[in-house]
Image (cartoon, rainbow, N blue to C red):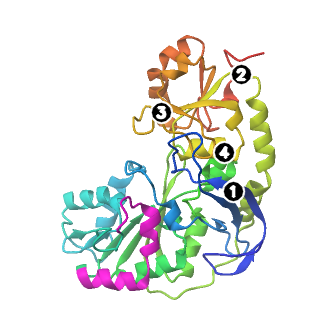
């Protein structure tokens, strides 16, 4: 299989990590026997520009959520600092206009308003972007990012001096068109602020839960800077804000420059991606071995990370259930694995021995406190993330395990 890179447009990607057909992780099932849509999931790295990406993301109509309560929240601890940085950019004043693209930009716009930048706008998905589906997410919005759509928004609202695009670029099926969209929308000399998750740590630690059909492009600081430069952006600043699972990469750039050929991809970039692609079978086998003879196992958190952990590693037959105290999810079944979603009280009722968490490490202590009754009877809480204090690898013994 050869693939044209969605960033540099060269037909050079040949080595793939192919997970085979996978269920979409926002497609919770009403019954364990319900039929479900699957789509091939394969990840590769472009040797020309170094960008890790999916070969063929599912169609937008299939990615669109079937449940209106599904939402995704991004880390925001860095937004005060980001807003302050934006107010100090050369050429901006309190008369400048700042635009956002999605609901993920609202909190930044609110911060800027409190700092005196009150001229803001954000398009309405229905009336301004033409999205009429009942449930609309980033998967639908990214498909509207075309130069023509940018000109229409500029005609209605006026070109902004600053355009915020938080956690959208990694979802784009046509990344080059999305970057052209930003160029067409922002005023000449203005700024585009792009924020994406940093895939570096997940690639380094061989964490395959990072692979998700909704994330099409997996940026590192190098590949993000290179992609913007190649698209004609002048990168003003690139800052990595640290978080427990993955850092947030924020670039402030100015469009309108001349696209330039970047220097060769550093050897460590390509080596990191190649190792990630090569090592999956070994990691999967090791994890399957770890979970043998552990007694009854549950997952905690009915989200896409649990879906990745169970489905990609082939663990459905080792897991009893998935616990989640979101009432919207209880009574449904996980995509792919068809595991039942039950409240956390079931950990004790079902006699679970080991519960694997996929929650953010910073809330693991709170989750452990909430499930004290489970651990008091000998149950063990562990994290699927290797950097967590609760990491499965750090457990010398597992109480309640079956010999």
Q: Nearer the viewer, mark 1 or mark 4?
A: 1
**Closer to the camera in the image, 126 or 196:** 126
Which numbered mark, 4 or 2, is in the foreground of this view? 4
Q: Which structural element holds mark 3? A: loop
Q: Please name whichever residue, 104 or 152, is drawn nearer the observer in this view of the structure.
A: 152
- Which part of the image, by quadrant, shows the C terminus? top right
At 76% across and 60% down in the image, what residue appears? 274
In the picture as drawn, the residue positioned furthest to the bottom comes out as: 258
Q: Which element is circle 2 on?
A: loop
Say whether disc 4 or disc 2 marks the residue closer to the N-terminus: 4
**Which of 276/377 is in front?**
377
Give yes or no for contact between labels 2 and 3 (Cβ–Cβ under 8 Å): no
- Residue 120: percent from left, percent from top: 23, 69
Q: Which residue is label 3 attached to? A: 324
Task: Decide which of tag 1 and tag 2 comes sooner along the chain.
Answer: 1
Which residue lies at the image location 67% right of the left edge and 68% below the top edge? 55
Q: CA distance from mark 4 to mark 2?
A: 26 Å
- Tell me if I can see residue 122 in this picture: yes
Q: Bounds of the magenta span?
A: 132-156
Mark 1 packing: few (<14 Cα in 10 Å), some, or many (20+)? Answer: few
Q: Residue at x 57, y 74 (%)?
A: 227
Question: Quick check: 301 left or right of 126?
Answer: right
Residue 76 disc label: none
Q: Which residue is mark 1?
A: 21
Query: Which residue is labeled 4 in the image?
Result: 311
Can residue 189 be seen here? The reply is no
Mark 1 against mark 2, which lies toward the viewer? 1
Which numbered disc, 3 or 1, marks the residue that appears first in the sequence?
Answer: 1
What's the mark number on residue 396?
2
Q: Nearer the viewer, mark 3 or mark 1?
A: 1
């Amino acid at each position: 299989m050869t693939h044209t890179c969605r960033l540099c447009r060269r037909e050079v990607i040949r080595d793939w990590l192919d997970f085979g057909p996978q269920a979409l992780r926002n497609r919770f099932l009403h019954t364990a026997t319900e039929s479900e849509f699957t789509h091939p999931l394969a990840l590769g790295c472009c040797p020309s520009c170094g960008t890790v990406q999916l070969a063929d993301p599912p169609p937008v109509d299939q990615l669109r959520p079937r449940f209106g309560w599904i939402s995704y929240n991004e880390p925001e601890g860095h937004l005060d600092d980001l807003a302050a940085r934006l107010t100090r950019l050369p050429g901006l004043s309190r008369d400048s206009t700042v635009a956002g693209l999605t609901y993920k930009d609202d909190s930044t716009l609110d911060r800027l308003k409190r700092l005196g930048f009150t001229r803001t706008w954000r398009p309405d998905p229905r009336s301004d972007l033409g999205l009429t589906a009942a449930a609309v997410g980033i998967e639908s919005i990214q498909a509207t990012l075309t130069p023509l759509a940018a000109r229409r928004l500029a005609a209605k609202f006026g070109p902004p001096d600053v355009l915020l695009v938080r956690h959208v670029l990694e979802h784009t099926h046509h990344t080059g068109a999305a970057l052209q969209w930003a160029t067409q929308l922002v005023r000449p000399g203005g700024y585009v602020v792009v924020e994406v998750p940093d895939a570096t740590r997940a690639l380094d630690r061989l964490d395959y839960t990072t692979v998700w059909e909704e994330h099409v492009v997996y940026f590192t600081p190098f590949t993000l800077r290179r992609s913007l430069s190649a698209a004609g952006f002048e990168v003003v600043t690139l800052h990595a804000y640290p978080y427990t699972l993955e850092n947030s990469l924020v670039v402030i750039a100015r469009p309108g420059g001349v696209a330039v050929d970047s220097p060769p991809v550093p050897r460590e970039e390509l080596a990191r991606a190649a190792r990630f692609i090569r090592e999956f079978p070994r990691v999967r086998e090791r994890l399957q071995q770890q979970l043998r003879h552990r007694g009854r196992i549950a997952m905690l958190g009915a989200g896409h990370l649990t879906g990745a952990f169970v489905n990609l590693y082939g663990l459905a037959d080792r897991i009893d259930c998935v616990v989640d105290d979101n009432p919207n999810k209880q009574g449904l079944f996980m995509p792919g694995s068809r595991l039942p979603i039950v409240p956390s009280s079931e950990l004790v009722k079902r006699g679970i021995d080991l519960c694997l968490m996929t929650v953010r490490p910073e809330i693991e202590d709170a989750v452990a406190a909430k499930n004290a009754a489970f651990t008091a009877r000998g149950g063990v809480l562990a994290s699927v993330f290797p950097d967590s204090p609760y990491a499965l690898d750090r457990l010398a013994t597992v109480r309640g395990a079956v010999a």
